Amino acid sequence: MTETRKSSPDVAAPRCVALVGPQGGGKTSLLESILHITGATSRKGTIKDGTTVGDSTEESKSRLMSTETTPAVASYLGDDWTILDCPGSIELTQETLTALMVVDAAVVVCEPDMQRVVGLAPILRLLDTYGIPHFLFINKIETSQVHMRDLLPTLQASSQRPLVLREVPIRDSDKVTGFIDLVSERAWSYNGTGTPSLVKIPDEVIDREQAARQEMLEALADFDDTLLEQLLEDVQPPTDEIYQQLTKDLREDLIVPVFFGAAESDAGVVRLLKALRHEAPGPQQASARLSAPVEEGAVSATVFKTVHAQHAGKLSYARIWSGTITDGMMLGDQRVSGVYKYTGQTATKVPNAGVGEIVALGRMDAVQTGDTLTKAGPVRTPLWPQPLSTVYAMALGAENRNDEVKLTAAMQKLVEEDPSLVFEQNPEAGGLILRGQGEVHLILAKERLQRRYNVSVTARKPDVPYKETIRKGVHQHARHKKQSGGHGQFGDVHIDIAPLDRGAGFEFHEKVVGGAVPRQFIPSVEAGVRDYLKRGPLGFPVVDVAVTLTDGQYHAVDSSDMAFRTAGRLAMAEGMPKCDPVLLEPIAEVTVYVPSEYTAKAQRILSGRRGQILGFNAREGWESWDEVKAYVPQAEMHDLITELRSLTLGVGSYVSTFSHLQELVGRDADKVIEQRQQQLAAA
């Protein structure tokens, strides 16, 4: 393929591009093709054989999918590149998001499948939100029966930016055999070698090419008045000016150029590489997008990925914006213990690295993902995104109780690697709780615990934090009296137990007169009451209750703090069952996001989970998407995300917050109480 343009003079430093898109689109195959065409590898690997540069971890091989971002380095026509092959699973979006923060451009890889186009919406939204220039590469095109004129409008519905077709296919019967470049108006044949050959434009494609070229120029004219005037005057703009406009608009994230090909046979990949070489911006634009602190000549590098490797220790993957990082240099109080370039799982140690390069820095223990390294030390990158909200949880336990401390330490490392994981101690939910983006996400974390840290864990559904309260009040008297030689124990109390409004919590009052209960023992009575509230007559913590100490008796010798604390607990134990106790279940306010075609089904899913639909509206800024709001019992939330994604080809999502406690009665309540009593008896 003859070179007609020189590489952009404003881009001298190595550049970085991310391969992103829905799972199954062929990102890893595209990486293999790029590495082979550029000579970075001598042969192409296959996913089936587990020989690809990307997807080379054990987790990726076992699932035949990308489970983490994989870097690779290549050179093309004198330009150096780092390519980041990012996961396509919606559950691993955090891994993709952090990688996107440091790239110069992204290539969104998708299939020519009208039914799966909806899967592009979340990733295109991320790119648009953060202003990341991106191309669209429609993969697996050679044998596709879908025509660009039909596919492009469907794709456009998922993009806020106009999609600008850069080439049209040449077909031989049902197979795509080449393309016509809409700027140069030259035709190329794939010829099965990876490097296309120049051919004559077939007569039957000329009209379609002219129409597509006009549409491209009209799209560009929306951003350039001079070009618009030329089109209105029926003047054909010079080819160089069209290329310049395409480059400008791409770098400003105004348009999305669209290419196509078939990565497995290398078809169309050279054309994509040419576009990247000429049009992708350099690291200066990426650092400005993040507002990363950059000082001429001084070191500045943003960490976008943290890995705790089994043998190498902690590695901080960083993109260098300015200066040179050398092995052994001090950045603040952190010493760089090794500078590495990675292609897949293969590391090459280098003495130093400069602007534009991506390197892994060894043993920077105090550095976190999202920090920008400077000579003075790490600082938080101003526009670094917040971690994604969690939507799925498991209660974990070490199979070997002796591994509990080891489990906590290992989980802290996994959470440092993946900010979208949350690990917390929550006794109400069942102890150690791991939260993340879905079942696969958490299973991967479990596997890493076993493989890297030799910690085997059990996992189960977290407990629902039910509470209980009362519907009526009672007056209760209780006496604790015990004589066992020497000083005995004596405490006598009269209390009023009364319900409070929902959400009021707990209140304690005293109305003792005449010193019936000495002042120093009143806090002990309250402590005894609080002791009991941890587990009421139904077996759950008690809320929304007021207790008033009204009277009592004491003994000058045998009364003590412990005696009155015990008396207070006894009074509650005897009085609470008389107060018509009732179970309370936590209710979440949930906002579900789905494409509009799935809105009615999403509402049925929520209703089927005892949800109360509050209404739905168009999702702001998302064409053809809706948001549905509902109150849903927390007991019904565990696998909601799994059902939503199954319904929506993987793109449905939700956010939720605790809303209120609500009475639960009938069979559902009886079942919960019975299970609770069995748990307590077994304990």
Image (tube, rainbow, N blue to C red):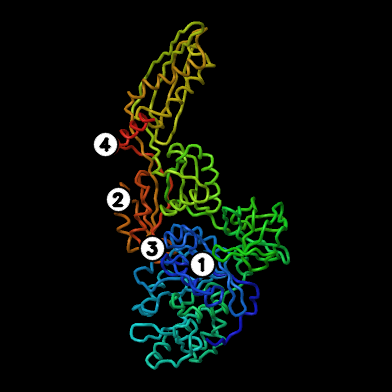
Residue 601 percent across, percent down from the top left: 30, 58
Q: Which residue is mark 1?
A: 53
Q: Nearer the viewer, residue 257 or 401?
A: 401
Q: Is residue 124 in sight in this rendering?
A: no
Q: How far apart are the alpha carbons under marks 2 and 4?
A: 18 Å
- Left or right relative to 4: residue 570: left
User: Which comes sooner in the sequence, label 2 or label 3?
Assistant: 2
Please name the amino acid that badge 1 sits on.
Val
Quadrant housing residue 325: bottom right
Of callouts 4 and 3, which one flags the residue occurring earlier in the amino acid sequence? 3
Q: Is residue 276 visible?
A: yes
| Disc 2 to disc 1, C-alpha distance | 46 Å
Picture coordinates of residue 53, whole percent (x, y): 51, 67
Q: Which mark is residue 625?
A: 3
Are the residues tagged 3 and 1 within 8 Å (C-beta)?
Answer: no
Is 15 or 529 nearer to us in this picture? 15
Instruction: Check the picture and name the quadrant holding the C terminus.
Output: top left
Residue on which disc 4 sits: 666
Question: Tag 3: residue type?
Answer: Trp
- Which callout, 2 or 4, points at the residue further toward the start of the chain? 2
* Residue occupying the point 58% across, 59% down: 304
Q: Return the residue nearer the eye: 549 or 360.
A: 360
